[in-house]
């Protein structure tokens, strides 16, 4: 069994792994490269393998850095099956359509050929099949081939880590592993039996604050901004982070813990994705017991007094006419585009206001510059001073921290032959690698782009 790293190697984004045996070839994820620019150069390069020869793609979850090049794969000749959980398929369609719009707009600005178009997205969705957790299936011939099983990764709704068995060996692909005690989703599962594992390392060298403290930290951020008479702006990923915030805000509002002020969700994509959450909100396979109990009492998690969802451009502009204090949640989560830029342009110079980061900020992103203490940043070609307060709550991350990653590996420590560290900044990989060796006594490797390993 041959494993080749075609993405996610010494990088956070672009997850893409090729697994080959004599009788079949599969990809695990086919993600978009994201960093200082949404439209990264690597996204335009041809695939280093022939897409026509790939039998199937296994999707771990619906974030764009794991699915964003699937339409490009189709355009290049792929006609196999694509597999994910049912919620992941629902989210992926909305996210791919949104991504196509952004990519094509940037391609036009740079006089480049678009990576793919709407028709490619629609054709990808026609190839997409859904699979539930723990339902084993095969790819390739009945005798031989790959045996596949999905497990709950606890990262976002419908996320999975995947166990692949072939030629008497088993390998786990972590996808992105979830933080503990996050709203709505169940905690990630663990297993005891695998020969090899690929593990994400986004927070490989870091520890989050206690998740139970984050609602109080959000409450404090809102109350401080309200007292100052300012606006709290929150750059948030449309997928999962916005819904987590809605869950927490619902609890704060319903229990009278924050003042009654307007709270705006200013993201068309987040609004569309929230409707997918609502579709699965009664399904115990995906929602945790705490959320189901709240819903059983008749509390609408995604609807509470003061919440306003601004779908149209006109509605978004009207937010400016609402006097502070107020809260604005908008995409993109790293401030690389979207409506958040308009709010940052308006409120970053205001010392009464605050910006709250609750998600990962990649190196080179506008969000990372603000988080790292930049005194001014360029937005819409203008140099904008950063006079507002800058706050961060890292425990809102949907990613497991170092402790969580070690806990996922620990039950497998006696069986694992090697762990490959992927999907993170290299310094995070090095820190986690040393911890794995010291605490679990498992051999590790940090693969390079294009490197292949015989398992």
Image: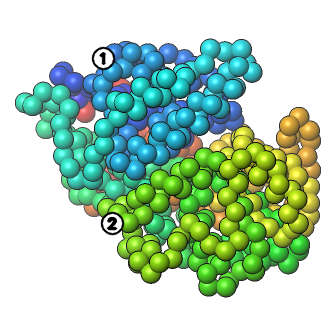
Pick the front one: 5 or 240: 240
Q: Residues within 10 Å of mark 1 (few under 14, many from 20)?
A: some
Q: Is residue 47 left or right of residue 378?
A: left
Instruction: Give the total number of marks visible in the rendering.
Output: 2
- Report which residue position mark 1 lands on: 53
Q: What element does badge 2 sit on?
A: loop
Q: Residues within 10 Å of mark 2 (few under 14, many from 20)?
A: few
- x, y percent for residue 299: 51, 76
Pick the front one: 87 or 211: 87
- x, y percent for residue 155: 45, 56
Pick the front one: 266 or 434: 266
Residue 108 visible to an observer of this rendering: yes
Q: Residue at the far bottom: name it.
A: 256
Q: Which residue: 49% across, 68% down? A: 183
- x, y percent for residue 348: 87, 55
| Quadrant of res 445 | top left
Tell me which label, 2 or 1, sits earlier in the chain.
1
Measure the alpha-carbon separation of dots 2 and 1: 38 Å
Q: Which residue: 77% across, 51% down? A: 316
Q: Which residue: 58% across, 34% down? A: 99
Q: Is residue 164 left or right of residue 4?
A: left
Q: Is residue 384 left or right of residue 283?
A: right
Callout in the foreground (2, 1):
2
| Quadrant of res 454 | top left
Give the position of the C terminus as an image quadrant: top left
- Report which residue position mark 2 lands on: 284
- x, y percent for residue 320: 86, 56
């Amino acid at each position: 069994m041959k494993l080749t790293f075609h993405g996610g190697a010494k990088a956070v984004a672009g997850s893409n792994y090729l697994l080959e045996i004599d009788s079949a070839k599969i990809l695990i994820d086919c993600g978009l490269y994201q960093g200082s620019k949404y439209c990264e150069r690597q996204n335009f390069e041809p695939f280093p393998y022939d897409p026509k020869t790939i039998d199937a793609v296994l999707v771990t979850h619906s974030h764009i850095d794991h699915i964003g090049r699937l339409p490009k794969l189709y355009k290049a000749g792929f006609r196999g099956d694509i597999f994910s959980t049912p919620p992941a398929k629902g989210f992926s369609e909305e996210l791919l359509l949104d991504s196509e719009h952004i990519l094509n707009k940037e391609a036009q600005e740079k006089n480049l050929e678009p990576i793919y178009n709407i028709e490619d997205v629609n054709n990808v969705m026609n190839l997409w099949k859904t699979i539930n957790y723990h339902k084993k299936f095969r790819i390739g011939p009945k005798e031989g081939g790959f045996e596949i099983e999905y497990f709950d990764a606890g990262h976002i709704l419908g996320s999975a880590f995947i166990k692949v068995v072939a030629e008497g060996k088993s390998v786990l692909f972590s996808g992105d592993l979830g933080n503990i005690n996050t709203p709505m989703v169940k905690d990630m599962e663990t297993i005891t039996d695998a020969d090899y594992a690929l593990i994400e390392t986004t927070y490989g060298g870091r520890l989050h604050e206690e998740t139970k403290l984050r609602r109080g930290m959000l409450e404090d951020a809102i109350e401080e901004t309200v007292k100052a008479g300012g606006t709290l702006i929150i750059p948030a990923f449309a997928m999962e982070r916005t819904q987590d915030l809605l869950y927490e805000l619902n609890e704060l509002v319903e229990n009278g813990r924050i003042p009654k002020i307007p709270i705006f969700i200013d993201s068309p994509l987040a609004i569309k994705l929230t409707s997918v959450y609502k579709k699965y909100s009664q399904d115990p396979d995906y929602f945790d017991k705490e959320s189901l109990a709240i819903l059983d009492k008749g509390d609408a998690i995604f609807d509470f007094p003061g919440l306003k969802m601004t779908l149209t451009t006109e509605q978004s502009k009207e937010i400016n006419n609402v006097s502070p204090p107020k809260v604005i949640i908008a995409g993109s989560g790293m401030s690389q585009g979207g409506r958040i830029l308009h709010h940052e342009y308006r409120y970053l110079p205001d010392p009464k206001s605050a910006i709250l980061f609750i998600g990962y900020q990649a190196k080179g992103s506008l969000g990372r510059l603000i988080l790292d203490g930049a005194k001014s940043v360029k937005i819409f070609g203008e140099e904008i001073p950063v006079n507002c307060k800058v706050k961060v709550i890292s425990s809102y991350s949907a990613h497991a921290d170092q402790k969580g990653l070690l806990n996922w590996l620990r039950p497998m420590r006696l069986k694992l032959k090697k762990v490959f560290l992927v999907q993170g900044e290299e310094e995070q990989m090095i820190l986690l690698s040393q911890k794995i060796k010291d605490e679990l006594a498992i051999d590790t490797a940090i693969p390079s782009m294009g490197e292949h390993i015989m398992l």
